[in-house]
Structures are given as structure tokens and as C-alpha cells.
Amino acid sequence: MDRERIMRALATVPESQREVIMLSYFEGYSQSEMADKLGQPLGTIKTRVRLAMQKLRTALENDGYERPNE
């Protein structure tokens, strides 16, 4: 994927959700490590990741990206 499209999609995600995506995908943190680093419950981190991924998927689909058939 084009880096510019990904960055545009990330800009549509709330800061708390963007933070966990950046930590996970760009810095390699696990969800447990993110919970420790951010001082948040693991369930909160899991929810933020899930919501962020849903929003990113929608933003990318609206930008013309089509997911492969699952």
C-alpha cells in the first residue's frame, strides 16, 4: 500500500487509537506491552486496536482500496 494513503487514513482515527496502531505496527509492541507502556488495562488496548482497524478499513475503502476476498 501507498504510505501516503495509510497516513491519510491514520489521520482519521482518534489519537488514542492511532497511538496503539503506531506502537503495534510501526514499533512492534504486543498488546500486553502496550498496556504496560501506556498504563491502560489490556481490554482497553484491545478495544482501541479493534476500533482503529475498523476505522482504517473504512477510510481505505472510501479511498478506493479494495480488500482481497477472504
Image (tube, rainbow, N blue to C red):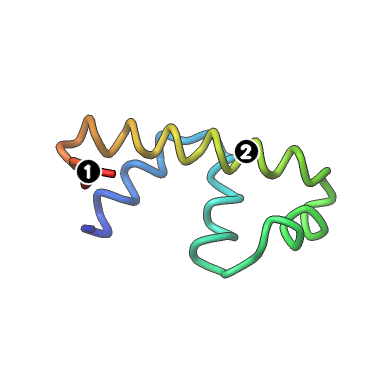
Q: Position of residue 38 (x, y in %)?
A: 78, 53
Q: Position of residue 7 (x, y in %)?
A: 34, 50
Left or right: residue 48 versus residue 36 is left
N-terminal of the two: label 2 or label 1? 2
Between 19 and 25, the one nearer to me in the picture:
25
Count the marks: 2
Q: Which residue is mark 1?
A: 69
Q: Quadrant of the C terminus?
A: top left
Tag of residue 7: none
Indicate the amino acid at tag 1: Asn
Residue at 46 percent of width and 41 percent of height: 53
| Residue picked out by circle 2 | 48
Q: Is residue 4 left or right of residue 17?
A: left
Q: Is residue 22 left or right of residue 10?
A: right
Query: Which residue shows up at 82% across the image and 58% down it?
Result: 36
Give the alpha-carbon distance from disc 2 to disc 1, as whole Å: 25 Å
Please state which amino acid type lies under the numbered disc 2: Arg
Q: Is residue 19 left or right of residue 33?
A: left
Nearer-the-camera pick, 25 or 18:
25
Is 46 located above or below residue 1 in the figure?
above
Q: In percent of the image, x 31 and y 44: which residue is there?
A: 8
